[in-house]
Amino acid sequence: MYGKETEKALAWLGKGQTPREMIRAYGEVKLAAVRAQQEAFSLYPQDYFPHLEESLEEIIRGERDDSFPLPLAQGGAGTSLHMNLCETASLLANEKFTGAFDADPLDHLARFQSTNDTFPTAVILMTYRFLEDTEKNVVALQEALVAREKEYEEWLMCGRTEGQDGLPITLGQVFGAWAGPVERDRWRLNKLKERLRTIPLGGTAVGTGFSAPREYVFAAEKHLRRISGLPLCRSQNLADATAHSDSLAEAAQGMGLCGDNLYKLASDLILYGMGPVGEILHGEVQYGSTIMAHKVNPVYLELIRGLSLEASSLARLIGEYSRSGQWQLNANLPFLAEQMIRLWERLNRALEIASGPLMDALKPQREVLERNFYGSPALINTLRIILDYSVIKDLLPRLKEKPFSSGEELIEFISGETGMDREELAEKLSSYRLTGFSRGAHL
């Protein structure tokens, strides 16, 4: 159910489907606007207005999505979608009402409004919810990583820098390190919501508020907060809020950084699971090859990396759309909104996989971790905490003759060569002493 202006738009845009998230947000903006019209000026007959509210509520709930056949990517800064919304809401309400009054899409539904203040307000609503959704999934991933940090706090392994074996670290510390950037993502997303909540509603076409009475503007802001349940506030600089979309670009960049951190996590895990290392295996989700029966593909990790790369690229593209505004308007806002939806979908899919299926699929191999550590020439680096440099140099040829497979073998060797007490050596070479703050050598 839509009118002539939507038909005109279909003729040149082609048939598509306006995304559900955008319909909901724009429907909420329009409901707030008509309630403000009614509160301030009683624009509609009292017996007609409930039908208009009901029609917009149906749109918000998703019961009329088939009346929004336009693709979101469109010229005109979103005017085609705004007209579609005004036509559909008025036609629905007019059909429900049995009296003599018919609301007009322009003279009634769009009064005191422009696409240029209502459309960006809807995009902000939609993006604010994306940040909330992403923050929830980031919290879930942080909790999953912290749980494994505690579970593996005594699993000793070899820390590596620049692709080389280095000093010991625990698997718990590795998971804790991955939790660090995720915690910063959580903080960043929360702060981004604060800056994003400012809306241009009431600024009309160029941010001057032309034709919009003060009573309407204040009422529209109030009703939109109530309808959306979000802590929105009207910008104190409407000309700025109408012309610029950098707060949306900033939100996208925050989500893009989250994607970058996910990519790093997945890349690390792919290396830990590779054949020569084999320390954190990726459980078999499906057959890994049509010809190699032994092969297990790290499908969750590869999917996370692919989705994260796309999310990072979309964040940069949104920045390009943001800076493309000219004078008092950014006409590319519909394109920005479309990419914001894609960014949200890709990033949250990656987060959901990372905190759920991936964590279940990861299989740390404690024996392999310890074997790789005790069999590494870098083990020599750890002896500096108990032996003088010259003593290590003297022992070096014999240390390299046969790799150790456990801490017990190492303690037995050093005790035999130096006469040091085995229990004392065990304490000094414990996972805590090797991976925590030292009180000094020979203490």
Image (cartoon, rainbow, N blue to C red):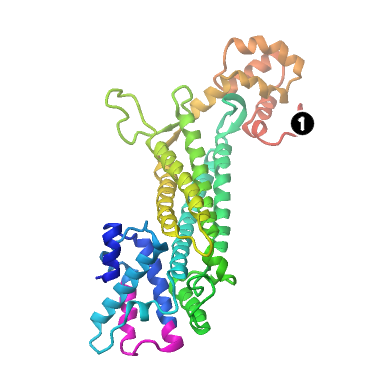
The secondary structure that most of the magenta stretch takes on is helix
Secondary structure under the numbered disc 1 in the rendered image: loop
- Give percent across and percent down for residue 323: 53, 54
Q: Is residue 54 magenta?
A: yes
- Give percent across and percent down for residue 34: 40, 80
Q: Amino acid at mark 1?
A: Gly
Q: Is residue 288 left or right of residue 387?
A: left
Residue at point 39%, 33% (across, down): 298
On screen, residue 131 above or below 107? above
Q: Is 47 in front, or is 385?
A: 47
Q: Is residue 398 magenta?
A: no
- Give percent across and percent down for residue 394: 72, 11
Residues shaded magenta: 37-58
Q: Is 214 in front, or is 409?
A: 214
| Residue ID for mark 1 | 440
Q: Is residue 365 visible?
A: no
